[in-house]
Amino acid sequence: MSAGFKGRREDLRLVTGQGKYTSDWNLPGQLYGSFLRSDRAHAEIVSVDTAPALASSGVVAVLTGADTARAGFKSTPQLARYPGRGGATIKVPHRDGLANGRVRFVGQEVALVVAKTALAAQDAAEKIEVEYRDLPAVVDAEEALAPGAEQLYPEIPGNLCFDYEYGDEAKTDEAFAQAAHVTRIVLDSQRMVGNPMEPKACLAAYDAEAGRYDLYVSSQGLSLMRGSASGITGIPAEKIGVHAHDVGGGFGIRSDAYAEYCVAMLAAKTLGKPVKWTSSRSETFVSDYHGRAAKLTGELALDKEGRFLAIRINWIVNTGAYLSTPGPLINTLPPGLHAINLYRIPVMYGRHRLGVTNTTPTTAYRGAGRPNVCYLAERLVEEAAREMKIDRLELRRRNLIPKEAFPYQTPHPHSVYDSGDPHGLVDEAVKQAEWKTFDARRAQSKKRGKLRGIGCGVFIEPAGAGGAPKEEAMIKFGESGNALLFVLAGPSGQGHETVYPEVVGEALGMDPEKITLRASDPDGPRLVGEGTIGSRSMMAHGGALLVAAREVVRKGTALAAKDLEVAPDDLEFAKGRYRVKGTDVSIGMEDLAKKYGSALDSGGEIPLPRSFPSGAHVAEVEIDPETGVVEILRYTAVDDCGRIINHVLLDGQLHGGIAQGIGQVMGEHAIYDPASGQLLNGTFMDYEMPRADGMPEIRLYDRSIPSPGNPLGVKGAGEAGTTGAVPTVANAVIDALRPLGIHHLDFPYTPDRVWHAIRATRSR
């Protein structure tokens, strides 16, 4: 971090209301859209009468599924472009931008009303009359995959859209046959609603002369959004300009193009005027892609000494009615990359089945499958320790990968953990959490009639990668000598405007205040790369910028040699100055930038980076058995995030990630009625969100080892907090309940659920 760090450059703009979010964009002559959505989970559309809406004051047009069908809308493009079990390929259900002939989930878009004002559009949408013929709805993935279930698509037999496997089934079976002990557990990683601060919105415009679309939208990166919109509409990607400035929360659900965006683009072209649409919070609940929604089954084989022999994994994933772009990917390939977590497990086998249902589609949500992996692994370890009567910390230490074994080849052929010190992480976490004196604190709680528990969670996760072949960045200089940075990042709170100038400023010896980030600029240089997903930004965009900065230094050497009338080899560069070796004659980089400007412009690229951040977290909780209320008293996190560029920004990412992990464990849960397919808790009145008053003091400690896999030596950190928090808090709560004979409880641990579990033990 720069010694002169003055805080995040973004903050003053944002906290004083000067941010520019999607709904703040306006264009001359724009019209406004409102969507009519299905109130049925599964039904045939018998008829759609748009006449009452068209007759309403201010209405310009109404688009229906017939319009998007004529436009040739395609299914959402997929990142999972690899074979599954037995060579099977993914089956992608076709989706028109607007429902055509059938609706498949509550909230699906049926029609778009375009009017001169937003209120006129909303009023008219309510006047559209749709006749439905109801069909049986299936909301649970296990039920959808069961024999005899309602078939949702003729082209997807058995509702199984992807069957994926990894590892060695035969060797895993052999290891289990030889095991002295086998622990088995079944967990539910419940469906969640991302609920970013900023509701979904877009403003679409079409330039008929240039044949170009401009899409103003909340986005986690230009390339992701543009590629997704292109894949759905068939419009060439280079004809779509994606504009995103401030983004009020991404979390994975702002990575690809939603149906609403593509329909707005069609309306803008059809009507010859920009079309603006802003979601209501109610629409957010039913139409924003959801997260998680997986049933996790795990088995751990151990020898008589408690050494891990093999792990067997089975996931059943609820994809919803359609497939998001990253959804199938994050639930299949990446989990296998770290299925053994931080343990020496020689063989593994996993099978993940993805089933379509009559629910909102699911996608990547902070952690993107990785919290599921570590939640399953850590609950298995806890239960194995209990069943074998081995201290849970001792069982972990007995099986953790030793520091000297890194880089560590996992049983997955494409997964090599880059660097780490698992024993050091656990030892530090246990020390800082004061684990040794926990029994005394538990006794104090017992005197007050409370149940106290402590839990440890260790984790490692793959970070980085993406679908692009490489990551590119560009540094350009203006006449003033100030620098502009161009990358394909999609900032949504990470602090990119602060940290990227710090990286380049340190490399060039320039004041970061003279360096400005232009992230995902549609009018900037054409770059290859990905957006802000998978905890990749600092590795990918930061790494490419560092390479570009080094090229600036190289070009500057020739220019400095010219000005100082010496040979380039006679110069050395340090702290922003080119100095003639053995003398005090020098010239500064900022001087060269002012004089030569664009002559210093440089690009940089790096291969697709991947790292494996890891950590050990400890949570301590107290439960009131009379109310079921769980209070998290302490939270200690020891993380290995590689080289740290800016501690303030890193801590912010870890705090936010931990809070969202706590949210999953303690309260968040999108609940569908199994008969009607209706979302039962689609408002903030009955969907519990993590709040500040439910957060403990979070104490963060660093035990980082640089990654050899990228120029900066960093590891991803944006999702590490979530991946660590989910198993950690779960283990703490179960530890508190264990004296009552409770060894398992499904998420979320709401007061009602905990209270009923306690009452059930008293009635035995």
Image: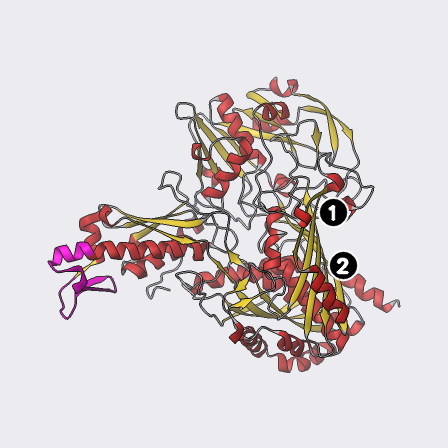
Q: Answer with mark 1 or mark 2, whichever residue precedes in sequence.
A: 1
The type of residue carrying mark 2 is: Asp
Residue at disc 2, secondary structure: helix
| Mark 2 neighbour density, 10 Å: few (under 14) some (14–19) many (20 or more) | few
Relative to 94, is 751 on the left or the right?
right
In this view of the protein, which residue sits in the foreground, 191 or 35?
191
Relative to 596, is 501 on the left or the right?
right
Looking at this rendering, what residue extends furthest in the left direction?
565
| Residue displayed at 20% across by 59% down | 588
Determine whether 226 is above or below 703 in the image: above
> How far separated are the C-alphas under marks 1 and 2?
25 Å
Looking at this rendering, what residue extends furthest in the right direction?
764
Relative to 153, is 430 on the left or the right?
left
In this view of the protein, which residue sits in the foreground, 64 or 53?
64
In this view of the protein, which residue sits in the foreground, 118 or 31?
31
Residue 587: x percent and y percent? Answer: 17, 60
| Mark 1 neighbour density, 10 Å: few (under 14) some (14–19) many (20 or more) | many
| Residue displayed at 44% across by 51% down | 15
Q: State the extent of the magenta-drawn residues as a range.
A: 558-586
Residue 22: x percent and y percent? Answer: 48, 39
Residue 756: x percent and y percent? Answer: 80, 61
Residue, disc 2: 752
Count of numbered badges drawn on the protein:
2
Residue, disc 1: 141
Task: Point out the image quarter for the C terminus.
Answer: bottom right
